[in-house]
Amino acid sequence: MNYRQEAEAILEALGGKDNVAAAAHCATRLRLVLNDESKVDEKKLDALDVVKGTFSTGGQYQIIIGTGTVNKIYAEFTQLTGLGDMSTSDVKSASAKKGNPLQQFVKMLSDIFVPIIPAIVAGGLLMGINNLLTAPDLFFDGSSLIDQYPGIADLAAMINTFANAAFVFLPVLIGFSAAKRFGGNPYLGAALGMIMVHPDLVNAYAQATVGDIPVWNILGFEIEKLGYQGQVLPVLVSAYILSKLEINIRKFMPASLDILLTPLLSLLFTAFITFAFVGPITREAGNLIIDGLVWTYDSLGFFGGLVMGLLYAPIVITGMHHSFIAIETQLLADIARTGGSFIFPIAAMSNVAQGAATLAVFFLTREKKMKGVASASGISALLGITEPAMFGVNLKLRYPFIAAIIGSGIASAFIVGREVLAVALGAAGLPGIISIAPASIVSYIIGMAISFAVAFSLTFVLAKRQAKKDAVKQAA
């Protein structure tokens, strides 16, 4: 393969180097920010053997090329455009500037929560292991593993402590990540998070067991000594205030005093208004949001699952699904009240359906290039990464996407009716089994089977209808 010629052909189809604002690559794709996507010649791109598919999302135009080849194409591409080597973070930053306010807000949440997902996933999975050890009727009728084997009771207790840490000290993680995202000192953000969960405060998880919450009495103004364990919204808003305050104080603070007074004033003022005003207000707002979601889940049941299952993939197209990370984090942090996340299982049903529809296309199509894209992206979707399948196959042909959202809707209605909940974040697909509450694992597996079967079979049905329509058009 002549990589130079392929890169030149791609660049020509994109509208020339003047239309490329930023470029990077991941394991399989060129990730580009274009000045004007309307200049892209989709037919010319699709005709290139090296191109396995294309899609546009979140301000990025992505070209699926494949492992091992994409880096060589990228090397030639950057020489032709003169952009130089860029990271995917650089491209994300460039694409964010093109988005509308809502898209920028979603990206902000994604930037804050994606870095802390490993800690949340680890905590949630440890919680799942603890549940396996302590849940009655899972392995033995009427008893749990620790009832049968008392020697592992302390092991379960230890794992439970490990599992809770990420959620108890969640404000520290969010404070660090949010302050960094807002342009402030991330260590000040972490310090603010530590203040919000200080041991001298009443633990938020134990609030219901405490009678009168103690207060600070400052010149007749009473401020509750209540912690923010497991809270998301209060620390997000407080970290924003802290970062902006730090930036503005630094503008007029003499350099000789900056290292002493800027952190002092920023943290003192932010911590005070957090406990006095911002914290109580945002705590109530966060609780109302979560209560509303739980009420919707409990009240709408089967119908709510159907609607959300139908809408999840279209939401992914807009990129709005990244905002769910913040909601899921709060659901998991308050798991004693919520039971876990109902969003994760629905996302898994959608991903499995997209993968099933794409694999059906693999068996249906005779086009060699489409077969290659469908096989790789279909398996990827089953494992939780759906963009290549959705944009490279299903949306291009349309009927597989329709089949997939119907399969997702039916499966989501089933799992919501069975009250399937996740106790951790992870890969929303086949590997997601380890993130599901033990009592819901069987229902989750059945849901995935329903999602796959409906989407796969319906793709064949809709393909036949599409073939008849095409035949009628050709005859006319």
Image (cartoon, rainbow, N blue to C red):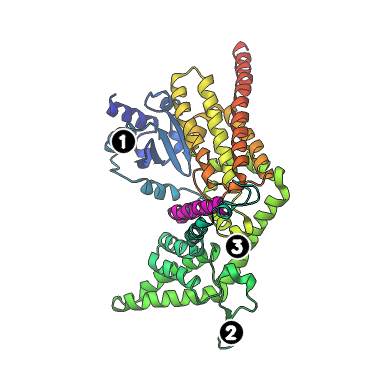
Q: Is residue 99 above or below residue 2?
A: below
Percent position (x, y) of residue 463?
60, 21
User: What type is the residue that disc 3 sits on?
Assistant: Gly
Q: What stretch is highlighted in magenta?
A: 108-134
Q: In which quarter of the image is the N terminus?
A: top left
Percent position (x, y) of residue 60?
44, 42
User: What type is the residue that disc 1 sits on?
Assistant: Asn
- The residue tagged 2 is 221
Q: How far apart are marks 3 and 2 (CA)?
A: 25 Å
Q: How far apart are marks 1 and 3 (CA)?
A: 44 Å
Image point (53%, 28%), residue name: 358
Q: What element carries label 3?
A: helix
Q: How many labels does the image show?
A: 3
Percent position (x, y) of residue 230?
54, 63
Q: Earlier in the sequence, mark 3 or mark 2?
A: 2
- The residue tagged 1 is 71
- Is 59 displayed left or right of 12 in the figure? right
Image point (55%, 33%), residue name: 354
- The residue tagged 3 is 286
Residue 18 shows in the view: yes
